Amino acid sequence: MCDVITTVDMHSGGSPMRIITSGIPEIVGKTYKERFEYVTTKLDYVREFLCYEPRGYRYMTCILPVLPDDEADLGVIFIAATLYLPMCGEALTCFARYAVDKNLVNMTTPETKIDIQCPCGIVTCHVDCTNGKAGKVRLESVPCYLHSSDIQLVLDNDVNVTVDLLYGGAYYVIVSCYELQKKLSMENFRVLEALSYDVTVKMRKYVKEKYQEDNRPFICGTIVRSHVRNSNSSEHFVNVGEMLINRGYCGSATMSRATLDYFQGHLNIGESRVYNSIVTNEGTTATVLRTANYGNKKAVIIGIQGIGFYTGKHEFTFEHSDNLKNGFLV
């Protein structure tokens, strides 16, 4: 373990992001995939060190820059408290702005295009650049698709729910608040937290029983959506991994929602909808850009936009005599 790790902290939509700037040992691997595997197996202490208390907290996401394969400009790994995320749109809006500001890529005006390699694939980022400064970021997703629909689950409270499974760079279960029989509001935060995690657990069990391991989708989390589907905006509550409640709009969740709206006929190519988090009331506009393919499945490319804001810099250290030097999670 290194004695010092430095970071630049940002947020997008209220979701805290921590870009690692120094203190990580050499990352071994000839390809992005090999480097990702090295980080997750040999450098996993970084996740606990930066995401766990007392230096972080369970809703923190860290961004580790890594060398990409030749077809991308930059590479990143998304590190959350309890898992490595396949995709994180809010993290990319922060990192893309940071990359331009710190000259990791050459700035062009009025827009700088960056292809960033993520675990889910290459995401194209368009950074607004005016007067020598980077600003808003538009993302173009990897191909997103409807994996399966109208899945029946029975929750611990004996409520039967019908859910859909979507891929928006990560696999999310989408369930209506109407199915959960709860109003989508902050007064129900703890209830929604528990119910949505129960949906995640039940869906993980469902796919484990239904699919062979090499063809089994990893369920990243659950999105509880508002019941209204015909308005220009919609709200949601996103529970990622093991009870990690997203503060902002959650980019990959938003991509999943727009994908579902497209395949269910609520959005057409070129149409947009605003998706808001009930936690911070921050949102993003998602647009169905064009059709695509994901293997033999019909898919779409979703565009979203956001901006990352700087919140500080850190120099994190530890003392060998500290019993909690590796951190703890509650």
Image (spheres, grey):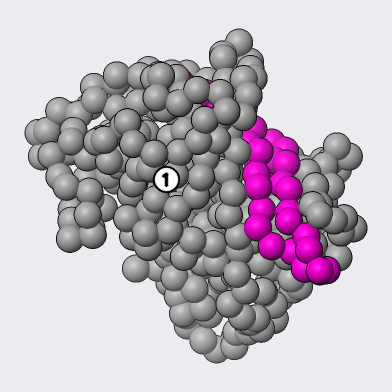
Left or right: 288 in relation to 197:
right
In this picture, which residue range is highlighted in magenta? 118-147
Residue 44 position, x and y percent, is 60, 59
The outermost residue toward the left is 158
Residue 130 sits inside the magenta stretch? yes
Quarter of the image for residue 97 reads bottom right
Q: Is residue 147 above or below residue 42?
A: above
- 271 horizontally vs 202: left or right: right
Which residue is at a point 56% across and 13% down the rendered structure image? 297
Crowd band around label 1 with a 10 angstrom C-alpha radius: few (<14), some (14–19), many (20+): many
- Front in this rendered view, residue 244 or 267: 267
- Location of residue 300 in the rendering, given as x and y in whole percent from the top left corner: 58, 24
Residue 194 x, y percent position in the rendering: 22, 50
Q: Assess whether residue 186 is covered by the magenta stretch.
A: no
Judge whether residue 205 can be spotted in this image.
no
The residue lying toward the viewer, choosing from 67 and 318, is: 67
Q: Is residue 95 above or below residue 302?
A: below
The residue carrying mark 1 is: 275
Is 191 rendered above or below residue 257? below
Q: Nearer the viewer, residue 244 or 41?
A: 244
Quadrant the N terminus occupies:
bottom right
Give the image location of residue 122, x and y in percent: 72, 38
SS for dot 1: strand
5 left or right, relative to 149 = right
Q: Amino acid at mark 1?
A: Tyr
Residue 328 as seen in the image, left or right of residue 237: right
Q: Give the residue displayed 55% in from the left and 89% down from the top.
A: 321
Q: Find the residue positioned furthest to the top.
A: 296
Where does the C terminus fall, quadrant-wise?
A: bottom left
Q: Please name the residue shown 13% across and 39% down the image.
A: 181
